[in-house]
Amino acid sequence: MSVPVIDLRGVAFAYPDGHQALFGVDLHIHPGERVALLGPNGAGKTTLVLHLNGILRPGAGSVAVSGLPVSEEHLAEIRRQVGIVFQDPDDQLFMPTVRDDVAFGPANLGLTGAESEARVAAALEVVGMSEFADRPPHHLSFGQRRRVAIATVLAMEPEILVLDEPSSNLDPTSRRELAEILDSLPVTILMVTHDLPYAAQLCERAVVLSDGVIAVDGPTLEVLADTETMARHRLELPFGFDPRTLPSRQER
Protein backbone atom coordinates (compact mmCIF):
# COMPACT_ATOMS: atom_id res chain seq x y z
CA MET A 1 0.00 0.00 0.00
CA SER A 2 1.30 3.47 -0.90
CA VAL A 3 2.03 6.16 1.66
CA PRO A 4 -1.14 8.22 2.21
CA VAL A 5 -1.08 11.68 0.63
CA ILE A 6 -3.49 12.78 3.36
CA ASP A 7 -2.87 11.25 6.77
CA LEU A 8 -4.81 12.38 9.84
CA ARG A 9 -4.21 10.47 13.05
CA GLY A 10 -6.24 11.16 16.18
CA VAL A 11 -6.94 14.75 15.16
CA ALA A 12 -8.91 16.74 17.72
CA PHE A 13 -9.67 20.43 17.52
CA ALA A 14 -11.55 22.99 19.63
CA TYR A 15 -12.19 26.61 18.70
CA PRO A 16 -11.20 29.40 21.11
CA ASP A 17 -14.80 29.69 22.34
CA GLY A 18 -14.55 26.10 23.58
CA HIS A 19 -16.61 24.48 20.81
CA GLN A 20 -15.09 21.07 20.10
CA ALA A 21 -15.33 20.43 16.35
CA LEU A 22 -13.21 17.28 15.90
CA PHE A 23 -12.80 14.34 18.29
CA GLY A 24 -9.90 12.07 17.31
CA VAL A 25 -10.30 11.85 13.51
CA ASP A 26 -8.34 9.17 11.64
CA LEU A 27 -8.41 9.59 7.86
CA HIS A 28 -5.99 8.15 5.31
CA ILE A 29 -6.30 8.97 1.59
CA HIS A 30 -3.93 7.44 -0.95
CA PRO A 31 -2.62 8.82 -4.25
CA GLY A 32 -5.24 8.97 -7.00
CA GLU A 33 -8.22 8.33 -4.72
CA ARG A 34 -11.41 10.36 -5.12
CA VAL A 35 -13.13 10.70 -1.79
CA ALA A 36 -16.42 12.41 -0.94
CA LEU A 37 -16.56 13.94 2.54
CA LEU A 38 -20.21 13.83 3.58
CA GLY A 39 -22.10 14.84 6.69
CA PRO A 40 -24.74 17.20 8.04
CA ASN A 41 -24.10 20.87 8.68
CA GLY A 42 -21.97 21.33 11.77
CA ALA A 43 -20.34 17.91 11.48
CA GLY A 44 -16.81 19.40 11.28
CA LYS A 45 -16.15 19.04 7.54
CA THR A 46 -14.80 22.55 6.97
CA THR A 47 -12.74 22.37 10.16
CA LEU A 48 -11.16 19.14 8.93
CA VAL A 49 -10.36 20.62 5.49
CA LEU A 50 -8.67 23.67 7.01
CA HIS A 51 -6.21 21.34 8.77
CA LEU A 52 -4.93 20.05 5.43
CA ASN A 53 -2.88 23.14 4.59
CA GLY A 54 -2.20 24.44 8.08
CA ILE A 55 -4.88 27.14 8.31
CA LEU A 56 -5.93 25.32 11.49
CA ARG A 57 -3.63 23.18 13.67
CA PRO A 58 -4.84 20.23 15.75
CA GLY A 59 -5.07 20.46 19.50
CA ALA A 60 -4.20 16.76 19.58
CA GLY A 61 -3.10 14.23 16.96
CA SER A 62 -1.17 14.80 13.75
CA VAL A 63 -1.70 15.80 10.13
CA ALA A 64 0.68 14.89 7.30
CA VAL A 65 0.56 15.56 3.57
CA SER A 66 2.63 13.34 1.25
CA GLY A 67 4.68 12.28 4.25
CA LEU A 68 5.37 15.85 5.43
CA PRO A 69 3.99 16.89 8.82
CA VAL A 70 1.82 20.00 8.58
CA SER A 71 4.19 22.28 10.49
CA GLU A 72 5.67 25.73 9.94
CA GLU A 73 8.78 24.46 8.19
CA HIS A 74 6.78 22.57 5.56
CA LEU A 75 3.85 24.96 5.04
CA ALA A 76 5.03 26.46 1.74
CA GLU A 77 5.42 23.03 0.12
CA ILE A 78 2.20 21.68 1.62
CA ARG A 79 0.21 24.68 0.38
CA ARG A 80 1.60 24.03 -3.09
CA GLN A 81 0.61 20.37 -2.92
CA VAL A 82 -2.89 20.91 -1.48
CA GLY A 83 -5.12 23.11 -3.62
CA ILE A 84 -8.34 24.16 -1.87
CA VAL A 85 -11.21 25.46 -3.99
CA PHE A 86 -13.71 27.28 -1.81
CA GLN A 87 -17.49 27.19 -2.28
CA ASP A 88 -17.67 30.85 -3.34
CA PRO A 89 -15.29 31.55 -6.26
CA ASP A 90 -15.27 35.24 -5.34
CA ASP A 91 -13.22 34.26 -2.28
CA GLN A 92 -10.40 33.35 -4.69
CA LEU A 93 -10.78 35.83 -7.55
CA PHE A 94 -9.58 39.38 -6.85
CA MET A 95 -7.31 40.44 -9.73
CA PRO A 96 -8.26 42.66 -12.71
CA THR A 97 -8.32 39.81 -15.24
CA VAL A 98 -8.71 36.03 -15.33
CA ARG A 99 -5.11 35.71 -16.52
CA ASP A 100 -3.85 37.74 -13.57
CA ASP A 101 -5.82 35.64 -11.10
CA VAL A 102 -4.46 32.36 -12.47
CA ALA A 103 -0.91 33.75 -12.57
CA PHE A 104 -1.04 34.86 -8.93
CA GLY A 105 -0.16 31.44 -7.47
CA PRO A 106 2.76 30.72 -9.82
CA ALA A 107 4.11 34.22 -9.11
CA ASN A 108 4.14 33.37 -5.41
CA LEU A 109 6.24 30.33 -6.30
CA GLY A 110 8.73 32.66 -7.98
CA LEU A 111 7.73 31.76 -11.53
CA THR A 112 7.83 34.49 -14.16
CA GLY A 113 7.91 34.89 -17.92
CA ALA A 114 7.40 31.91 -20.18
CA GLU A 115 7.16 29.38 -17.35
CA SER A 116 4.36 31.30 -15.63
CA GLU A 117 2.56 31.90 -18.93
CA ALA A 118 2.71 28.18 -19.72
CA ARG A 119 1.20 27.30 -16.31
CA VAL A 120 -1.60 29.83 -16.83
CA ALA A 121 -2.36 28.68 -20.37
CA ALA A 122 -2.40 25.00 -19.37
CA ALA A 123 -4.68 25.58 -16.36
CA LEU A 124 -7.16 27.67 -18.36
CA GLU A 125 -7.24 25.10 -21.14
CA VAL A 126 -8.05 22.29 -18.70
CA VAL A 127 -11.10 24.17 -17.39
CA GLY A 128 -12.18 25.41 -20.83
CA MET A 129 -11.63 29.10 -20.07
CA SER A 130 -8.75 30.03 -22.40
CA GLU A 131 -10.81 32.46 -24.43
CA PHE A 132 -11.74 34.40 -21.28
CA ALA A 133 -8.16 35.06 -20.14
CA ASP A 134 -8.38 38.84 -20.57
CA ARG A 135 -11.88 39.24 -19.12
CA PRO A 136 -12.49 40.71 -15.66
CA PRO A 137 -13.66 37.83 -13.44
CA HIS A 138 -16.73 39.76 -12.28
CA HIS A 139 -18.00 39.82 -15.88
CA LEU A 140 -18.24 36.02 -15.93
CA SER A 141 -21.13 33.78 -14.95
CA PHE A 142 -21.01 32.00 -11.59
CA GLY A 143 -20.15 28.68 -13.27
CA GLN A 144 -17.35 30.30 -15.28
CA ARG A 145 -15.94 31.93 -12.14
CA ARG A 146 -15.92 28.56 -10.42
CA ARG A 147 -13.91 27.10 -13.30
CA VAL A 148 -11.44 29.99 -13.08
CA ALA A 149 -11.13 29.43 -9.33
CA ILE A 150 -10.19 25.82 -10.07
CA ALA A 151 -7.66 27.03 -12.66
CA THR A 152 -6.00 29.26 -10.04
CA VAL A 153 -5.35 26.14 -8.00
CA LEU A 154 -4.34 23.92 -10.94
CA ALA A 155 -1.71 26.48 -11.98
CA MET A 156 0.14 25.55 -8.79
CA GLU A 157 0.28 21.93 -10.04
CA PRO A 158 -1.06 20.44 -6.80
CA GLU A 159 -1.07 16.74 -6.01
CA ILE A 160 -4.32 17.03 -4.04
CA LEU A 161 -7.44 18.99 -4.95
CA VAL A 162 -9.89 19.78 -2.15
CA LEU A 163 -13.28 21.05 -3.32
CA ASP A 164 -15.90 22.62 -1.06
CA GLU A 165 -19.40 22.10 -2.50
CA PRO A 166 -18.23 22.29 -6.14
CA SER A 167 -21.71 21.80 -7.65
CA SER A 168 -23.56 24.38 -5.53
CA ASN A 169 -25.45 27.12 -7.41
CA LEU A 170 -24.67 25.60 -10.82
CA ASP A 171 -27.26 25.10 -13.55
CA PRO A 172 -27.51 21.55 -14.96
CA THR A 173 -25.22 22.22 -17.94
CA SER A 174 -22.52 23.88 -15.81
CA ARG A 175 -22.82 21.06 -13.30
CA ARG A 176 -22.23 18.44 -16.00
CA GLU A 177 -19.35 20.37 -17.57
CA LEU A 178 -17.64 20.73 -14.21
CA ALA A 179 -18.03 17.00 -13.53
CA GLU A 180 -16.33 16.24 -16.85
CA ILE A 181 -13.44 18.55 -15.93
CA LEU A 182 -13.00 17.04 -12.48
CA ASP A 183 -13.24 13.51 -13.87
CA SER A 184 -10.32 14.24 -16.22
CA LEU A 185 -7.88 15.55 -13.61
CA PRO A 186 -4.93 13.25 -12.69
CA VAL A 187 -4.90 14.28 -9.03
CA THR A 188 -6.16 13.02 -5.69
CA ILE A 189 -9.54 14.60 -4.92
CA LEU A 190 -11.29 15.22 -1.61
CA MET A 191 -14.75 16.65 -2.27
CA VAL A 192 -16.89 18.14 0.50
CA THR A 193 -20.47 18.00 -0.71
CA HIS A 194 -24.14 17.74 0.16
CA ASP A 195 -24.82 16.82 -3.49
CA LEU A 196 -25.03 13.05 -3.10
CA PRO A 197 -25.58 12.23 -6.81
CA TYR A 198 -22.41 14.26 -7.56
CA ALA A 199 -20.54 12.26 -4.94
CA ALA A 200 -21.78 9.04 -6.55
CA GLN A 201 -20.73 10.24 -9.99
CA LEU A 202 -17.23 11.44 -9.12
CA CYS A 203 -15.99 9.61 -6.02
CA GLU A 204 -15.53 5.89 -5.53
CA ARG A 205 -15.15 6.30 -1.76
CA ALA A 206 -17.28 8.20 0.75
CA VAL A 207 -16.45 9.23 4.30
CA VAL A 208 -19.23 10.41 6.60
CA LEU A 209 -18.19 12.86 9.30
CA SER A 210 -20.73 13.16 12.10
CA ASP A 211 -20.36 15.04 15.39
CA GLY A 212 -16.65 15.45 14.79
CA VAL A 213 -15.79 11.79 14.18
CA ILE A 214 -15.57 9.51 11.14
CA ALA A 215 -18.80 7.53 11.37
CA VAL A 216 -18.70 5.69 8.03
CA ASP A 217 -15.98 4.99 5.45
CA GLY A 218 -16.68 2.82 2.41
CA PRO A 219 -17.56 2.61 -1.30
CA THR A 220 -19.78 5.57 -2.16
CA LEU A 221 -22.63 3.59 -3.70
CA GLU A 222 -22.74 1.21 -0.74
CA VAL A 223 -22.79 4.09 1.73
CA LEU A 224 -25.58 5.88 -0.14
CA ALA A 225 -27.64 2.69 -0.42
CA ASP A 226 -27.53 2.07 3.34
CA THR A 227 -30.81 3.73 4.32
CA GLU A 228 -30.31 3.24 8.07
CA THR A 229 -26.88 4.87 8.04
CA MET A 230 -28.10 7.69 5.83
CA ALA A 231 -31.01 8.48 8.13
CA ARG A 232 -28.87 8.30 11.26
CA HIS A 233 -26.51 10.94 9.88
CA ARG A 234 -29.18 13.19 8.36
CA LEU A 235 -28.22 12.46 4.77
CA GLU A 236 -31.08 12.38 2.30
CA LEU A 237 -31.06 11.35 -1.35
CA PRO A 238 -33.01 13.38 -3.93
CA PHE A 239 -36.44 12.02 -4.87
CA GLY A 240 -36.11 9.21 -7.42
CA PHE A 241 -32.33 8.81 -7.07
CA ASP A 242 -31.44 5.16 -6.40
CA PRO A 243 -27.70 4.44 -5.98
CA ARG A 244 -28.38 0.70 -6.28
CA THR A 245 -29.09 1.16 -10.00
CA LEU A 246 -25.78 2.89 -10.76
CA PRO A 247 -22.59 1.25 -12.00
CA SER A 248 -19.50 1.85 -9.89
CA ARG A 249 -16.80 4.18 -11.29
CA GLN A 250 -14.65 1.15 -12.05
CA GLU A 251 -17.45 -0.32 -14.20
CA ARG A 252 -18.00 2.82 -16.29
Image: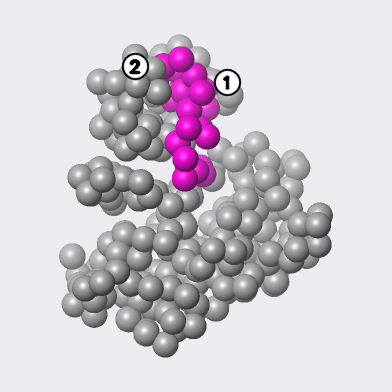
Report whether residue 67 is seen. Answer: no
**Residue 63 relative to residue 127: left or right:** right
The residue carrying pointer 2 sits among few (fewer than 14), some (14 to 19) or many (20 or more) residues within 10 Å by Cα, namely some
The label on residue 135 is: 2
Q: Amino acid at mark 2?
A: Arg
Of 86 and 111, the residue lying toward us: 86
Which residues are the magenta region? 83-106
Left or right: where does residue 146 sit relative to residue 28?
left
- Pointer 1 local density, CA inside 10 Å: few below 14, some 14–19, many at least 20: few
Q: What residue sits 37% from the left and 84% below the top?
A: 226
Task: Identify the residue at horizontal 21%, vertical 73% (top origin).
Answer: 240
Residue 64 falls in image quadrant: bottom right
Where is residue 73 shown, x and y percent of the image?
A: 74, 41
Which residue, as the protein is rendered here, is positioned at the far top?
113
Mark 1 — residue? 110
Does the rendering let one see residue 57? yes
Amino acid carrying label 1: it is Gly
Spot occupied by residue 102 in the image (x, y as percentages of width and height): 44, 25
The colour scheme is one colour
Residue 110's spot in the image, x, y percent?
A: 57, 20
